[in-house]
Image: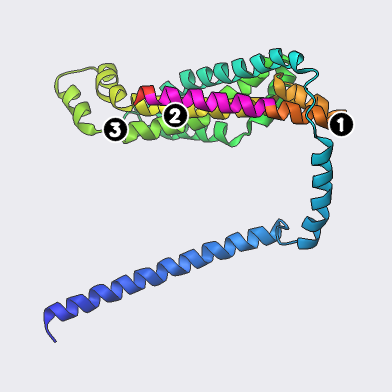
Amino acid sequence: MNTDTLDHSGILARQQRAWNVGALRLLAILCLIVACLYYVGLFDGERLAEGGPSLLRLLGEMLPPDFANARDWLRPLIDTLAMSVAGTALAVSLSLPLAFLAARNTTPHPVVYQFTRGLLNALRAIPELILGIIFVAAVGFGALPGVLALGLHSVGMIGKFFAEAIEHADEAPIEAARAAGATPLQVLLHGVIPQVLPQMADISIYRWEYNFRASTVMGMVGAGGIGFELMGSLRIMQYQEVSAILLVILLMVTLVDTFSSTLRKRFK
């Protein structure tokens, strides 16, 4: 048996082992997923069957949608939109400096890197609803606690994505700026930011879309907006009005998504 045949056999054997390992990992993941589905009761056919008629009955009570108070929803919708814009702007302004500290190629020291990453993880780990409850207790009802909750929670996500974009920046322009004698600030302004600015714009716009949807929920904890009106209708079981508010929210989400898509095209 010649050397080429042995090499070919070795390659096939390694590929077979790699395939077997991959198949075992996939099987383990599938088993874990099935176990989780079983644990949460998704395979409980009797329970699901009992819930079906109740859901259909509730949907029947929501029809037809009642838009009698639609004029009163205009101000809460404006509050929701303003909350999402302000929360995203706050998050972007705080995330930008933190991202440079949380990126390996721009952080001044490994300790600063670890601390900033930990801070971003902490902000990302606390749900915005919990932050909303905290800020409602701190500053009272209205849009302000919603903005603070959305902004701080978004810092954890936007800062992480900004930092990863900075870490993947091409080193050639950065090294060229350093070789030309640029200061660290000039290196950031001329070597890093021009490369990552389109990605940062995309991330910010996507987060605004998310924050608009999240801001409709923030009203349920007293942070104002259309979510507050939705919660009020749910509490008094005005399901026809609930369906009308949900349709209005769906329309606004569609408009926001369309507008954000247009903005992303302009940044490409």
Question: Which stretch did the figure color magenta?
Answer: 248-265
> Taken as a whole, is the magenta stretch helix, strand or loop?
helix
Spot occupied by residue 87 in the image (x, y as percentages of width and height): 57, 20
The residue wearing badge 2 is 203
| Mark 3, residue position | 169
Q: Amino acid at mark 3?
A: Ala
Magenta residue check for 5: no
Please state which of residues 231 and 249 is positioned toward the viewer in this rendering. 249
Tell me the element at label 2.
helix
Disc 3 versus disc 2: distance between alpha carbons?
A: 16 Å
Q: State if disc 1 and disc 3 touch (CB < 8 Å).
A: no
Question: Residue 260 colored magenta?
Answer: yes
Q: Quadrant of the N terminus?
A: bottom left
Q: How many labels sit on residues?
A: 3
Q: Secondary structure at mark 1?
A: loop
Q: Position of residue 39 (x, y in %)?
A: 70, 59
233 horizontally vs 267: left or right: right
Of labels 1 and 2, earlier in sequence is: 2
* Mark 1, residue position: 237
Which corner quadrant of the image does residue 250 belong to?
A: top right
Q: CA distance from mark 1 to mark 2?
A: 38 Å
Few, some or many residues within 10 Å of mark 2 (<14, 14–19, 20+): some
Q: Is residue 175 above or below residue 37?
A: above
Q: Earlier in the sequence, mark 3 or mark 1?
A: 3
